[in-house]
Image (cartoon, rainbow, N blue to C red):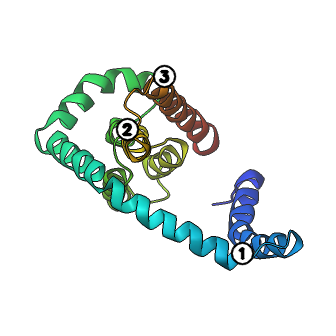
Amino acid sequence: MKESIFVVLIKAFSTILIPLMLFTIPIWGFVKKINVYEVFIDGAKDGFKIAVRIIPYLVAIMVAIGMFRASGAMEIFVRIFSPITSLIGMPAEVLPVAIMRPLSGSGTLGIITELLKSFGPDSFIGRLASIMFGSTETTFYVLAVYFGSVGIRKTRHAVASGLVGDFTGIVMAVLFCRFLFG
């Protein structure tokens, strides 16, 4: 199967991006006279302190996700929303990815792994699930962890903004995938 020039360019860019970052950051630090290693170690120490502080929030959200999946609520959501998603060309098999993604990245990866095993990574469903994963964020997880780590209790518009962003990412993933892969 011949790939379009756009797909070839994206693959080439993806291949060189991480090595480019690995060379650029130390060079930038040398130019700016910053000890990159010490800054990295300081950041790692802060990251460890934050990780210890957010453990209760992580446990709470993991328990909630486990209860959500084990209770059968996921299947009920899929049945309710699949007629709506079929209007934009989104297969019902991918809907659990869209539902789980705002809650948990690792839970979503589990669902995507099952989809890739069932349909293959080059299938439309496999590609759509992968693009959807990259186009959305773990909104509730991020809010619980980040807001919880600094003690913010009033989220104001953060939940609505995050969910609008997730919805936009899901719709654009479907449209983008339909445009590129039919």
Q: In x, y percent, where is residue 68?
A: 18, 39
Q: Which of 41 and 182 is in front in this view?
A: 41
Q: In x, y percent, where is residue 97?
A: 36, 43
- Is 88 displayed left or right of 99 in the figure? right
**Residue at coordinates 46% horizontally, 53% vertically from top-left?**
123
Q: Which quadrant of the figure contains the C terminus?
A: top right
Q: Which mark is residue 157?
A: 3
Q: Which quadrant of the figure contains the N terminus?
A: bottom right
Q: Which of 112 and 161 is in front in this view?
A: 161
Q: Is residue 23 above or below residue 11?
A: below
Q: What element carries label 1?
A: helix
Structural distance between the alpha carbons of marks 1 and 2: 33 Å
- Is 175 displayed left or right of 13 in the figure? left
- Find disc 2 in the rendering and name its residue: 140
Give amino acid for label 2: Phe
- Find disc 1 in the rendering and name its residue: 36
Give amino acid for label 3: His
Q: In x, y percent, where is residue 145?
A: 39, 47
Q: In x, y percent, where is residue 73?
A: 17, 33
Sequence-first tag of 3 and 2: 2
Sequence-first tag of 3 and 1: 1
